[in-house]
Amino acid sequence: MDLKGKTVLITGASSGIGEACARRFAGAGANLVLGARQYVRLCGLADQLEKAHGIQAVAVQTDVSREEDCRLFVEQARSTFGGIDVLVNNAGISMRALFQDLDLAVLHQVMNVNFWGAVYCTKYALPSLVARRGSVVGVSSIAGYKGLPGRTGYSASKFAMQGFMESLRIEHLHTGLHVMVACPGFTASNIRNTALVADGSLQGSSSMEEGRMMTADEVAGLILRGVRQRRRDLIITGQGRLTVFMSRFFPKLTDRLVYKHFTKEKDPLIK
């Protein structure tokens, strides 16, 4: 897929994997519509990418947990560029708390962003994507294949997103719509710093060793290649592929290994 002159929508584009995707797609010559809550930062990124790559980039302040924000985000893309070729549902938040300690409002918040945000944006972009035989991408996680301790809400939201995307793919098996689920493993980004703890406040710092993780730019490069090749599923890290394989064929052993892995966090929730 030649992305030069195509219109690409990216949610959660002000930082992390979303920002890295914006840079990668701009480098490929795509025009961008960038959505995030941090509008000032988003405008700066759009201006920077226009100057660096000679493309058009539009910043739209968007809280994907709000359906009307998602509708306006997609409408801005249609009114500016006439249609949509790629939608990258990247916006997401994480959480870290044992379920027994968790305020249920945290689960609602995580589901509203990670699952409903993808549903809302896809719903409004779908007619244009189908008309152009475009691509819809869900940035999920290995947590969408394997439930992780202390991340009940996060894992649930990613399982839900993947089920939604798989159903959508089958519904559009003969329309030309490309549906890709991208599942990074642990990626160095600010998602753990802004993870919600039991009472809904921000964690403030990462519970893991970020220096050993794949960078957001590396993940974005693989997502770009996956869109070009119209891949179906993208399990990005070797650790992720091993986890999915082990979970399928050796589920009890995998449970024990995952448990052991999370006892090594900073200030672990399980011991």
Image: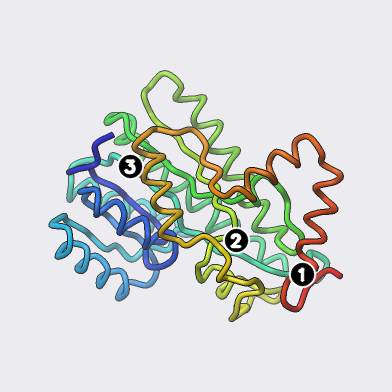
Question: Which residue type carries mark 1?
Answer: Lys
Task: Specify whether 147 is left or right of 206.
Answer: right
The answer to whether residue 54 is above or below residue 234 is below
Amino acid on which the number 3 mark rests in the picture: Val
Query: Mark 3: few, some, or many residues within 10 Å (few <14, many ≥20)?
Result: many
Callouts 3 and 1 close, C-beta under 8 Å: no
Of tags 2 and 1, which is closer to the observer?
1
Q: Please state if 141 lies on the left or on the right of 104 as rendered.
A: left
Question: Circle 1 sits in a helix, a strand or a loop, which is it?
Answer: loop
Distance between mark 3 and mark 2 Cα atoms? 24 Å
Task: Answer with the quarter of the image where residue 62 lies.
Answer: bottom left
The quarter of the rendered structure image containing the C terminus is bottom right
| Secondary structure category for the residue under label 2 | helix
Q: Along the horizontal axis of the image, is 236 left or right of 61? A: right
**Residue that carries the numbered disc 3 in the rendered image:** 86
The amino acid type, in three-letter code, at marker 2 is Val
Q: Nearer the viewer, mark 3 or mark 1?
A: 1
Image position, residue 246 (x, y; %): 75, 41
Give the residue pinned by disc 1: 264
Q: Which mark is residue 110?
A: 2
Q: Nearer the viewer, residue 57 or 224?
A: 224
Q: Residue at x 21, y 51 (%)?
A: 31
Q: CA distance from mark 3 to mark 1?
A: 39 Å
